[in-house]
Image (cartoon, grey):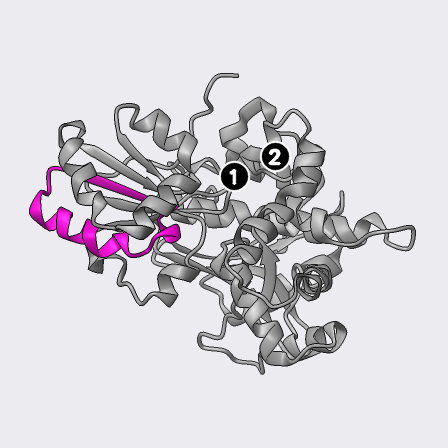
Amino acid sequence: MSYLLRFLDQKKGSFFLFGPRGTGKSTWLRWKYPDAAWIDLLDTESERKYSARPERVKDFVNANRSKGTIIIDEIQKVPQLLSLVHQQIELDKSIRFVLTGSSARKLKQSGVDLLAGRAIHRQMHPFMAAELGSLFNLEKNLKLGMVPLVLFSGTPAETLKGYIDLYIQQEVKTEGLVRRLDDFNRFLEIISLSHGQLLNVTSIARECTASRNTVESYITILEDLLIAVRIPVFTRRAKRAMAAHAKFYFFDCGVFRSVRPSGPLDSESEIGGPSLEGLVLQHLRAWIDYQAADMKIYFWRTQAGSEVDFVLYGNNGFFAIEVKNSTFIRKADLRGLKTFHHDYPESRAICLYRGEETIEEDRVLCMPVETFLKSLHPDQPIFPM
């Protein structure tokens, strides 16, 4: 099929492009910079060659200077190259360097400074609904997710099942990030039950029969591999006692479903609700990054139990968003939003649900979640005023 345009925009100068495996970083770069010179560090021979002698990159730059753009794919494989790239940027600012990565772990561990501000950081996310256009199907994408590698596979369901195995084999095992893969696999299943929930590390450690420090290190591995994220609680000008734990999400709702164990005792609502919440979150994260919006994502939960799924706060706006996996709105569904709006009258309260009508209910905008996802575009406000 023809290439689907992504919302990630082209930047002047050198930049990092981070994103989980399969989100389309290399595809986008080959489309955007067809004449660029490439160093592909996923190729074992290239990785070996540049690991043995990182200074070879100077010869590569000199030989390809006329191409104007040099791409180093999966830079975390040989982090020693960063200091040399830094030198080359200082020597000749006419050359654009694009450095991709699907893991920040080795870069952080090596103590590199990510070029000390010489290159901006960009993030590639799974597809947004508006990028897929007519190919977006809410029911289908709730199950398969939005990762390009999965959706455009000949066997998407099988590819999705193998997605986490790809990370376990190529990143976790190869880099020796954990001592026992069977312990890590068990952890993955257990933490999948925390998707969209408060993250209680002590409770997960008890389930894993592992120490709290071990589980915390496992969670950090998921974050460094860009396949999971923690959302902090919104505490600014808090008027109530707030929850202490962050919330946990996998970066893609399909990946979450592929990891989560399920069987006859698991109802679809137990899985469908967190899937929908995760799908909304990954769209919000993409919109913020692609628009370069001055906005961060939080959630809100009081110790008394009032909760709002997402709070967006920054110079680009202040929104409280609740996600409901139901086709109608009950008064009780809006209770958390009303409580939040009472404490923060400057915010705008929105409830996304599976119905078909956009209505205003007690100063809360109730919008079909499918309508919201399809209309979300970096060139447009996140919600109509």
Secondary structure of the residue carrying numbered label 2: helix
Residue 55 x/y as whole percent:
20, 49
- Residue nearest the viewer, comparing 315 with 63: 63
Question: How many C-alpha atoms fall within 10 Å of the one at disc 2: few (<14), some, or many (≥20)?
Answer: many
* Side of 11 relative to 189 (left or right): left
- Residue nearest the viewer, comparing 11 with 170: 170
Numbered circle sitting on residue 290: none
Instruction: Identify the residue at horizontal 9%, vertical 43% (top origin).
Output: 92
Instruction: Identify the residue at horizontal 67%, vertical 31% (top origin).
Output: 156
According to the picture, the residue beneath numbered tag 2 turns out to be: 150
Residue 12 x/y as whole percent:
20, 39
Mark 2 touching mark 1, by CB under 8 A? yes
Q: Amino acid at mark 2?
A: Val
- Residue nearest the viewer, comparing 233 with 214: 214
* Side of 295 relative to 92 (left or right): right
Q: Is residue 90 visible?
A: yes
Q: Amino acid at mark 1?
A: Gly
Q: Name the residue at the left extreme.
A: 91
Q: Which residues are magenta?
A: 74-100
Secondary structure of the residue carrying numbered label 1: loop
Asked where in the image residue 29 lies, by quadrant, the reply is top left
Residue 23 x/y as whole percent:
49, 39
Numbered circle sitting on residue 22: 1
Instruction: Identify the residue at horizontal 60%, vertical 24% (top origin).
Output: 135
Asked where in the image residue 192 lies, by quadrant, the reply is bottom right
Q: Name the residue at the right extreme.
A: 264
Residue 240 x/y as whole percent:
57, 81
- Residue nearest the viewer, comparing 319 with 124: 124
